[in-house]
Image: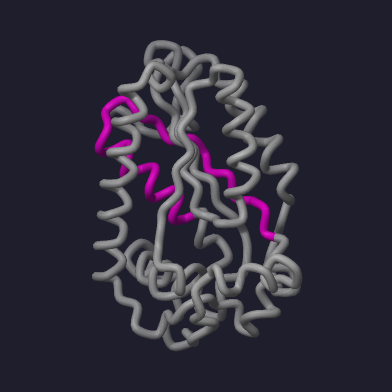
Amino acid sequence: MLTRSLGALTSPELARRAPVLAVPLGATEQHGPHLPLGTDTAIATALCHRLAAAVADVLVAPAVPYGSSGEHAGFPGTVSIGQEAVELLVVELVRSLDDVAAAVLVNAHGGNRAPLHRAEQRLRSEGRPLLVWSPTGPADDSHAGHTETSVMLHLHPDQVSPERAETGATAPLPDLIEPLRNHGVRAVSSNGVLGDPTRATAAAGRRILDDWTASLTAAVGTFRATPLGG
């Protein structure tokens, strides 16, 4: 059986494949009282493996489980390496990928987006074949709400505590972004939730994952058809 995981290959096996490498980018941070700290990493990893199942020459790299999570400081369990470290990590990681056709960075943590954008600009200016992709969701459901809780109920129900789920701040993220950036998530949500997870279901999570997978697969197809991605 052909492995889809980079970490399970030997060096000579990789040399014969020249694949597209999908890299899951996550975080280790609070996700309210009901979701595990590794939620973003679990979602990014699942999306990469779904991409690999849909596209023949995609391999999945080991996940990056730390990100820029300073906005979640003050909640136990949050680990952050900051924006500069995320940007540098991505730049050096992609620069090292001489034996793959292209890199697809699948990011499931909103706090990584700004440093990823800067890294992407820098790497593209160097001619590196790179796609950065993040799942989308409702503006009033951006963290540990219905979307993420539903997805985790589908992926890892044993890690979810639905009985502890509580509604958090439900205003659209653009309305919360200034105090959130200046003072962190706790300033806008005492339980760390941005959204309402109380009606989340595994069935909804499967539909969301299917939609995200279709979007990611289409984005990779378009990317591969361009000179930079091909």
Magenta region, residue range:
42-69
Determine if the magenta segment contains residue 35: no
Q: Which residue sits at x=49%, y=35%?
A: 61
Establish if 19 lies above or below 28: above
Establish if 209 lies above or below 127: below
Determine if the magenta segment contains residue 51: yes
Left/right placement of residue 172 relative to residue 152 reads: right
Q: Position of residue 128 (x, y in %)?
A: 54, 20
Q: Which residue sits at x=39%, y=69%?
A: 147
Establish if 218 lies above or below 75: above
Q: Quadrant of the C terminus?
A: top left
Left/right placement of residue 18 relative to residue 174 reads: left
Q: Which residue sits at x=30%, y=76%?
A: 201
Establish if 95 lies above or below 172: above
Quadrant in the picture for residue 84: top right
Q: Nearer the viewer, residue 37 or 125?
A: 125
Q: Quadrant of the N terminus?
A: top left
